[in-house]
């Protein structure tokens, strides 16, 4: 996109740089959106004689499958189930009928028994069934890397990791996330934006660049390269067609059950303490019930100050 922009604006050269997450939140031009699907390694499924996941799968189907897919002798795990929120826990909480934050943004949902059920389901793969790498193992090697290297048969992940899995040459595919115990389907939907730094020395040129990034031309580049689902309406089919070896339409079809990523006026005030506590739960230092109550108390205290 930078090359295409420079060709039309030879007097402006774009230098692509990564920016720390803490400095990112300004208002911006919509860039993309994402949902989460159940990625699976077809080769490992075939070897274990397990049918591929589909839209009829429930939590129980996953539990049954992972025990057949796990092969310690070959260093293969049935699933990677980290305490990542967007890719894993927020989704299992919603599938269980729980919530992360109340609709009025004034109360935590972590004191809801259904929220605990969603957390427990994801944790059981690590502690009860032992079909997922441990928290330490998933710290040493990220779960998306474990999946990309064929060490995990399944991993719930966003569409944004498509380039990674495609580059790895995996014989893989993606299915909808499984339904919870009451048949509830859900996935978190999130999106990113292109922003202009408030203290930029080149505001006019920066705006011209961001304005271009919001154009149909730029979004078509995002879509056709398979980089991410573009925010520009009507181009999701181009993204789906970018990698026909995968059922990428899965991510688009799940928009019907998508729930916006949980936020409040000062989201950062409760997300870091929440993640710290989840790390303790996954690390075996806190049980789910104690940890969830701690998160609820921390969140409620933070939300009361907004």
Image (spheres, helix red, strand yellow):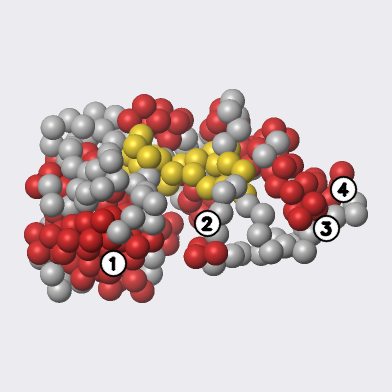
Q: Nearer the viewer, residue 200 or 182?
A: 200
Mark 2–mark 1 Cα distance, whole angstroms, equals: 19 Å
Decide if residue 298 is in sight here: yes
Q: Nearer the viewer, residue 254 or 264?
A: 264
Distance from the alpha carbon under mark 1 to that under mark 3: 40 Å
Q: Name above or below for residue 75 compared with residue 27.
A: below
Q: Position of 151 compared to 106: left or right?
A: right
Task: Determine the secondary structure under disc 4.
Answer: loop
- Mark 4 — residue? 9
Say which label, 1 or 3, has the lower sequence index: 3
Q: CA distance from mark 3 to mark 4?
A: 8 Å
Q: Between tags 2 and 3, which lies in front?
A: 2
Q: Earlier in the sequence, mark 4 or mark 2?
A: 4
Q: Please, what secondary structure does the residue beneath circle 2 have?
A: loop
Measuring from the top left, give residue 233's x and y in whole percent: 58, 28
- The residue at the point 52 percent across, 56 percent down is 25
Residue 165 shown left or right of residue 147 in the figure: right
Q: Please provide percent x and percent y for residue 246.
A: 47, 37
Q: Which mark is residue 273?
A: 1
* Disc 3 residue crowd, few under 14, some 14–19, many 20+, Cα 10 Å: some
Q: Which mark is residue 25?
A: 2
* Residue appearing at x 76%, y 55% in the figure: 203
Instruction: Give the residue pinned by disc 3.
Output: 13
Provide residue 306's location: percent of width, then percent of height: 33, 55
């Amino acid at each position: 996109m930078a090359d295409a922009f420079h060709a039309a604006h030879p007097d402006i050269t774009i230098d692509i740089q990564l920016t720390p997450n803490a400095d990112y939140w300004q208002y911006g031009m919509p860039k993309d959106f994402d949902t989460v699907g159940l990625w699976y390694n077809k080769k490992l499924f075939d070897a274990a004689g397990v049918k591929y996941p589909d839209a009829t799968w429930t939590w129980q189907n996953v539990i049954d499958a992972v025990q057949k897919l796990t092969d310690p002798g070959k260093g293969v795990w049935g699933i990677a189930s980290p305490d990542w929120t967007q890719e894993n826990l927020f989704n299992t909480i919603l599938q269980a009928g729980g919530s992360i934050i109340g609709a009025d943004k004034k109360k935590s949902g972590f004191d809801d028994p259904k929220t605990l059920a969603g957390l427990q389901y994801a944790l059981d793969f690590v502690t009860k069934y032992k079909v997922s790498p441990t928290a330490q193992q998933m710290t040493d090697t990220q779960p998306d890397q474990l999946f990309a290297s064929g060490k995990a048969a399944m991993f719930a992940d966003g569409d944004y990791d498509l380039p990674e899995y495609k580059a790895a040459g995996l014989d893989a595919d993606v299915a909808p996330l499984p339904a919870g115990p009451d048949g509830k389907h859900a996935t978190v939907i999130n999106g990113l934006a292109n922003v202009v730094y408030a203290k930029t020395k080149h505001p006019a040129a920066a705006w011209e660049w961001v304005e271009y990034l919001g154009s149909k031309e730029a979004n078509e580049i995002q879509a056709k390269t398979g980089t991410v689902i573009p925010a520009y309406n009507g181009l999701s089919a181009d993204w789906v067609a970018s990698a026909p070896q995968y059922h990428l339409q899965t991510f688009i079809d799940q928009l019907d059950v998508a729930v916006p990523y949980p936020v409040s006026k000062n989201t950062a005030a409760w997300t870091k303490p929440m993640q710290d506590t989840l790390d303790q739960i996954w690390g075996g230092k806190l049980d789910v019930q104690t940890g969830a109550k701690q998160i609820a108390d921390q969140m409620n205290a933070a939300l009361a100050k907004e």
